[in-house]
Image: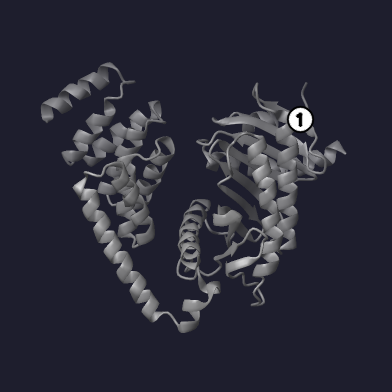
Amino acid sequence: MSDDVHRMSEELANDPGSRVFVPLGEALRLQGQRDLALKITLRGLERHPHLADAHDLLARVYADGGDLERAFDEWDMVLRLSAGHLGALKGMGFICFHRERFGDAERYLSAAAASDPDDAQVASALGHVRTAHHEVARAHEASAPNAERHDSRYLFVDVLPDEGQTALLLDREGLVLAGAYVGADGDDLAQEVGAELSGVTDEARRTTRHLSLGDWTSLVFETEVAVVAMAPAAGDGLLVLATSRATPLGLVRRLLQRCAERARGWLEGTR
Amino acid sequence: MHSPFTDMLNTVARVRGVTAALVVSEQDGIIVDANVQIGQPGDRVAALAASLYRKARLAARAASLGDVTFMQLEAPGGRLCAVGGGGLVLVVVAAALVNVGLVRVELLRASADLASLAEGRR
């Protein structure tokens, strides 16, 4: 192994633009030389910012150091550069499992299992995630007040635990299917907000199609008091998430994904 | 030709991944000034972006969310970001992999000047 490291180090020294920094960084990571692996990977990424395997390596280096937030971001980047990247799917599945986001974990690991059905490690992890997911869902079902269990207004309550975060699921006519939007005076303004915002999506659809960008995937606007994020939902529906102005945009995107997953599951269950 | 918006547009257009930067009238979608790469449909971008921004602004206000300070539309083939001020909209079209954080910072920085430049234009 150290011979390989030596050889690859020389190769990199002779050709700083070489992609050998990826196997070199991986070898150093496996040897426990995390700081050196990090340095070499970051330097390599300066020359190859769109190299998915390099971002994957960086994610693993961060994960080794316990920095799961950065690891997640890097794997997120990997999937943008290389959709279906097995390492990234496994990594994101692991982090979601670690954070008890079992639905997300199951989604990532299922995609990983579909990509490599012979990977016993993925199959085993997926089994664990599904078991944990079922247990948590059963516990939540048992502990939720009766009204919450059957009232669609509470659909996103446990997905959006912080005060000032709220989500709505609208049908194609802009009518509220689930969720709530509580105003400053405590009134539920879901129907009014939904009706106003759903009109924007026709414009979004028109814009991306005319500009040949593909179907829109999200529309976010920051206002003086809130950040509003919208995404298309099944059946030409619309998911609207509103958070406080202080919520970082990266977190808003994650919350939107979680709400979309919840809405998808709920819509499938109500069919 | 150097307009009051040229420096602002050049700054935004320098961000890697940005393919077009335009100052557009929010009301009618007419281009006031633009820095657009060859092949980008400037007029169409301007009209659609202005209309989308206007609709978002009116909807946010009607929903008691206040004025829109930044808007971002995402699609697999790219992003469209916008800020407004003084009846004008500063629009950016960018590749999907653009550093959107950087675009946002540049746009928010520019939006402070947008309204004052619009005043000077009247």
Nearer to the camera, A99 or A230: A230
Q: Is residue A49 left or right of residue A238?
A: left
Q: Residue at x 60, y 54 (%)?
A: A236
Q: Is residue B31 left or right of residue A112?
A: right
Q: Is residue B25 above or below residue A6?
A: below
Nearer to the camera, A171 or A139: A171
Q: Residue at x 56, y 41 (%)?
A: B75
| Residue B109 at least partly seen | no
Nearer to the camera, A147 or A40: A147
Residue A265 position, x and y percent, is 45, 62
Assess disc 1: are there few (<14), some (14-19) or many (≥20) residues with their C-alpha within 10 Å of its C-alpha: some
Q: Chain of mark 1?
A: B
Residue with the mark numbered 1: B33
Task: Give the SS element for disc 1.
Answer: strand
Find the residue positioned furthest to the right: B122
Q: Residue at x 21, y 43 (%)?
A: A118
Q: Quadrant of residue A126?
A: bottom left
Q: Residue at x 72, y 57 (%)?
A: B59
Q: Amino acid at mark 1?
A: Asp
Q: Quadrant of the N terminus of chain A?
A: top left
Q: Is residue A160 above or below residue A204?
A: below
Residue A85 position, x and y percent, is 34, 39
Q: Quadrant of residue B31?
A: top right
Q: Is residue A39 left or right of residue A80?
A: left
